[in-house]
Amino acid sequence: KAPSLIIEGLHLDLSEFGSWRQWSPEVQWQIDIKNTIENWYSSSSSMDVQTSGSTGVPKQIPLLKERMTQSARATAKHFGLQEKCKALLCLPCQFIAGKMMVIRSMVNHWELAAIEPSLNLSGNTQNMDFIAMTPHQMSHMLIGQDEIGNSKTTVILGGAAVSAVLQDQIKHLKARVHETYGMTETITHVATK
């Protein structure tokens, strides 16, 4: 089965010559998703990715697509995520975390649901197998609801440290939640807890 993107009622085929090519997004967060897909299928062996600036001055760095593919496969293997996995993209595709969610979906043949990156993820996590979000997004969600995902959902938290308070709140969730460590230069996470 081809990887797919579900966004605002559209169901797009993400294979190289899929229906995503006819998609004409008009808002920036969607344009960033399409640009990620276009860059992935370009003839270049690398993608330029913007660093966050947490370890120095923000800059564009090239990442080899072969290494990004290895990272995408390693994530699926590590968390036991199979083909047809339902994943949620709720991070901006301007940075590595969002880009890698799109790339993981294409490499591993997942069904990716994309929503506008925000703190309000309510109602979008229940039927997902895999979600990447920031600790801030998780904290905000826990204020508004008791549950995130379900017992089959894997959530990875990255981009900042997980506070002791949030760690305690996470213990009560059905979803399997992992704190991650990584950066743009390591092609997203390289360690999980």
Image: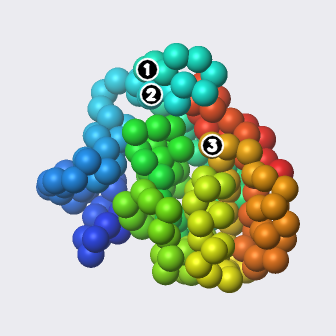
Q: Label 1 is placed on what type of residue?
A: Gln
Where does label 2 land, which residue?
Answer: 50
Q: Which residue is mark 1?
A: 60
Q: Position of residue 24 (x, y in %)?
A: 15, 54
Between 75 and 31, the one lying in front of the other is 31
Instruction: State if disc 2 and disc 1 touch (CB < 8 Å).
Output: yes
Q: Earlier in the sequence, mark 3 or mark 1?
A: 1
Residue receiving disc 3 = 159
User: Mark 2 against mark 3, which lies toward the viewer?
Assistant: 3
Query: Colour mode?
Result: rainbow
**Label 1: element kind:** strand
For the residue labelled by badge 2, is the local secondary structure a helix, a strand or a loop? Answer: strand
Label 1 Cα crowd, 10 Å radius (few <14 / some 14-19 / many 20+): few
Q: Which three-letter amino acid code belongs to the residue tagged 3? A: Gly
The reply to whether dot 2 and dot 3 touch (C-beta < 8 Å) is: no
Q: Residues within 10 Å of mark 2 (few under 14, many from 20)?
A: some
Residue 139, x across and y down, in percent: 65, 64
For label 3, the SS is loop
Instruction: Name the one closer to the observer, 16 or 71.
Output: 71
Q: Amino acid at mark 2?
A: Gln
Q: Is residue 38 left or right of residue 110?
A: left
Asked if 43 appears above or below 157 in the picture, the reply is above
- Residue at position x 59%, y 66% from top? 140
The alpha-carbon separation of the residues under discs 3 and 1 comes to 18 Å
